[in-house]
Amino acid sequence: MQESKSKLGVTLLGGVVVAIASLVLYGSLWASSPDKWDEFRKEMSDACAAGSEMGDPAVTVDPFGTSSYGVALVSGTRAGDTADVTLVCVATKSPDGPVDVERSGPIGEFVEAAAD
């Protein structure tokens, strides 16, 4: 009797593990659907353009970003300037869209690292 209860417990536990794994896999597949990636790219583009201080910036979004961050290049002319500049935009990925959006200074102002 005790042995059959033990086997039943292992079978139930195995079923629960399979069910949870299936939900996680399904959720990952859903989150990675083409529509979700298109939505991510649109939100990333809007978020990066919003704080760029450019009238009509061109935003080029890395299609998938990193596992944790969305990445984009933002190009255009800043208010008061005459030359085009390009900025790097990085945002934390979240279920609600990009958050903690940050932009670099113009890429032309980067300093080359000295070689050893």
Image: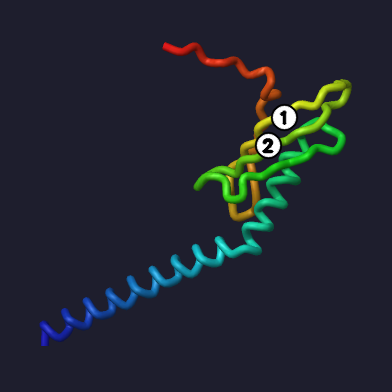
Q: Quadrant of the N terminus?
A: bottom left
* Total marks placed: 2
Q: Which residue is mark 2?
A: 73
Q: Residue at x 64, y 43 (%)?
A: 99
- Secondary structure under the numbered disc 2 in the rendered image: strand
The spot of residue 72 in percent (x, y) is 65, 40
Disc 1 and disc 2 in contact, CB within 8 angstroms: yes
- Disc 1: CA contacts within 10 A as few (<14), some (14-19) or many (>=20): many
Q: Which residue is mark 1?
A: 86
The spot of residue 52 in percent (x, y) is 77, 33
Give the residue type at disc 1: Thr
The spot of residue 21 in percent (x, y) is 38, 68
Asked if 112 appears above or below 101 in the picture, the reply is above
Q: Nearer the viewer, residue 82 or 18?
A: 82
> Viewed as shown, does residue 81 lie left or right of 88?
right
Q: Nearer the viewer, residue 15 or 62?
A: 62
Give the residue type at disc 2: Leu
Who comes first in sequence, dot 1 or dot 2? Answer: 2
Q: Quadrant of residue 111?
A: top right
The spot of residue 75 in percent (x, y) is 76, 33
